[in-house]
Image (cartoon, rainbow, N blue to C red):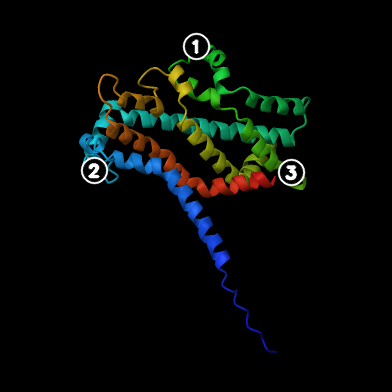
Amino acid sequence: MTVMPLARPRFSPLRLGRALSAHAVMLFAVALTLFPMLYALLVSTQTTQEYYTFPPNLLPGTGTLHNYTVAFERAALARLVLNTTIISLAVAFGKMLLSVTAGFAFVYFDFRGKLVFFVLIFLTHMLPVPVRIVPTFQLMDQLGWVNTYWALTVPFFASATGTLLFRQLYMTVPASLADAARIDGAGPLQFLWNIIVPISRTNLMALFLIEFIYMWNQYLWPLIVANTETTRVIQVGLKVLIATDAAVEWNIVMAGVVVAMIPPLIVLLLTQKSLITGLSLFEEK
């Protein structure tokens, strides 16, 4: 039998132009997105004289070591990074735990008012953070949690989005799997830990990344509830680098900004695959 050779696609100038245009638009969007971060990185390497030159200098400078040393000493960046890391990790793991157990309860348990409770959880999205600040601060004050890690973490543990994410995931798990586990003598917690949690690994990593970055960028609530150096987070502590009685040394400020970007960037690079997979699965459900 004679195999006919595959016909080569004809060269089309119009198709080539469309492809080049699409790539040009994407490259422009990437450059526009990365420019603020790259500019901050460049400024963090320049001396004060190099930064205030005109036209602006877009080349690396000679003040890298000095800028980062001053930023760490002036703003106590090591302590700020440690505080923010502890808070972000605590909130991320707390939301993962509550979201998994809440989603599990809404799918595998029948109780009165289940639908009502589920709707009430999502009604919390109608109350933005600024609206809840005053009553939440009053509660933290009554509990004696002001200027503690408890006030910076516990109010963020509940997650309506995480509850929906895992509820939708567990609704796709065959009911026969739960029946088989019950026949084998596995209790609810054993079924959750040994079967449900392993199949939730991708969604857990996606939720962890989202919540870690969300907490890392928190500013308003930590500014109100944490006023001591031992509990101050990095987004609030960077304000120390901006002097009010003298010219702002933006090269030192940008050194602090670069330091603040490194931990969430590392977490993003380590979990980006899980984030993309988890979000795609969430959209399919």
Label 1 packing within 10 angstroms: few (<14), some (14-19), many (20+): some
Label 3 packing within 10 angstroms: few (<14), some (14-19), many (20+): some
Residue 6 is at least partly visible in this image: yes
Residue name at image x 50 percent, y 33 percent: 214
* Cα–Cα gap, marks 3 and 2: 62 Å
Residue name at image x 75 percent, y 33 percent: 109
Badge nearest the viewer, 3 or 1: 1
- Depth check, front residue: 138 or 242: 242
- Depth check, front residue: 163 or 198: 163
Left or right placement of residue 186 versus residue 128 in this view: right
Residue type at numbered disc 3: Ala
Q: Secondary structure at mark 3?
A: helix
Please provide percent x and percent y for residue 41.
33, 41
Q: Which residue is mark 2?
A: 61
Please provide percent x and percent y for residue 164.
67, 35
- Depth check, front residue: 211 or 102: 211
Residue 178 marker: 3
Residue 141 marker: 1
- Depth check, front residue: 137 or 107: 137
